[in-house]
């Protein structure tokens, strides 16, 4: 039976789909024998703290929020990695069914992990942040951009966080590094044997 890894970010247009497709490629390159044993997907989950931040900025959410295509900026970064994403990709929410089916849920934000554990306490043991699983101890660009108010607090908010080339490429570069750092621990957590560097 395939193990299901779910990557979770806010809008499912940038960081989580990047993680889904990049990590799939990483498995193919390093441990081909694991390809049939792992299923990957990505979803959106908006924690209450983020809803409050967006409400305070009075910028609202894109409508519709789900069913949107991959962000052009993210598609471009993936293409630079040699990864082509199917045109049919559409953003989707994290549902109770996916939480139940998942073997591991990796969130971008600590607020997502905390709220998901509150909502699904029975799933708490399988929810982790990308920072935790990668043991990343540096700053994170998306947190820095919020802290230093680089993100516009007006109608251009979503254009910036989803399509601004510098913002997105920096965020995805950090995701790439964290996924590489987390690779072995993710597979170990799932109880899968792996051979680093194998091209089996």
Image: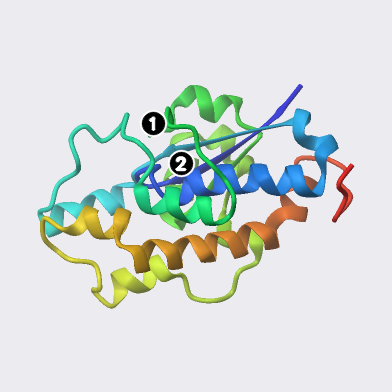
Q: Is residue 53 visible?
A: no
Of residue 6 and residue 84, the one placed in the foreground of this image is 84
Residue at the spot x=52%, y=27% of the render? Answer: 98
Residue at the spot x=11%, y=55% of the render? Answer: 155
Image x and y of residue 135, in percent: 65, 66
Mark number displayed over residue 90? 1
Of residue 64 and residue 29, the one placed in the foreground of this image is 29
How dense is the environment of label 1, judged by Cα within 10 Å: few (below 14), some, or many (20 and up)?
A: some
Mark number displayed over residue 147? none
Task: Say whether residue 148 is left or right of residue 103.
Answer: left
Is disc 2 placed on a helix, strand or loop?
A: helix
Quarter where residue 170 is shown: bottom left
Q: Is residue 36 visible?
A: yes
Image x and y of residue 187, in percent: 77, 46
**Residue that numbered label 2 is attached to:** 116
Q: Is residue 145 above or below residue 64?
A: below
Give the mark toward the camera: 2 or 1: 1
Image quadrant in which the C terminus is located: top right
Of residue 198 and residue 55, the one placed in the foreground of this image is 198
């Amino acid at each position: 039976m395939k193990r299901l890894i779910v990557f979770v970010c806010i809008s499912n247009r940038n960081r989580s789909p990047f993680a889904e497709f990049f990590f799939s490629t990483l498995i193919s390159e390093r441990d081909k024998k694991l390809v049939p044993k792992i299923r990957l997907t990505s979803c959106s989950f908006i924690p209450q703290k983020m809803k409050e931040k967006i409400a305070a900025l009075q910028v609202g959410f894109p409508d519709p929020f789900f069913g949107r295509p991959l962000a052009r900026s993210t598609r471009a970064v993936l293409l630079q990695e040699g990864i082509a994403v199917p045109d049919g990709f559409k953003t989707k929410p994290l549902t109770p069914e996916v939480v139940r089916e998942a073997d591991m849920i990796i969130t971008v934000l600590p607020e997502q992990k905390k709220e998901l554990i509150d909502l699904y306490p029975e799933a708490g043991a399988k929810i982790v942040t990308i920072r935790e699983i990668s043991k990343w101890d540096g700053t994170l660009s998306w947190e820095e951009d919020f802290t230093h108010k680089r993100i516009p607090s007006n109608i251009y908010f979503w254009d910036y966080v989803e399509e601004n080339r510098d913002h997105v490429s920096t965020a995805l570069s950090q995701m790439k590094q964290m996924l590489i750092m987390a690779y072995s621990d993710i597979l170990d957590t799932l109880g899968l044997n792996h051979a680093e560097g194998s091209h089996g």
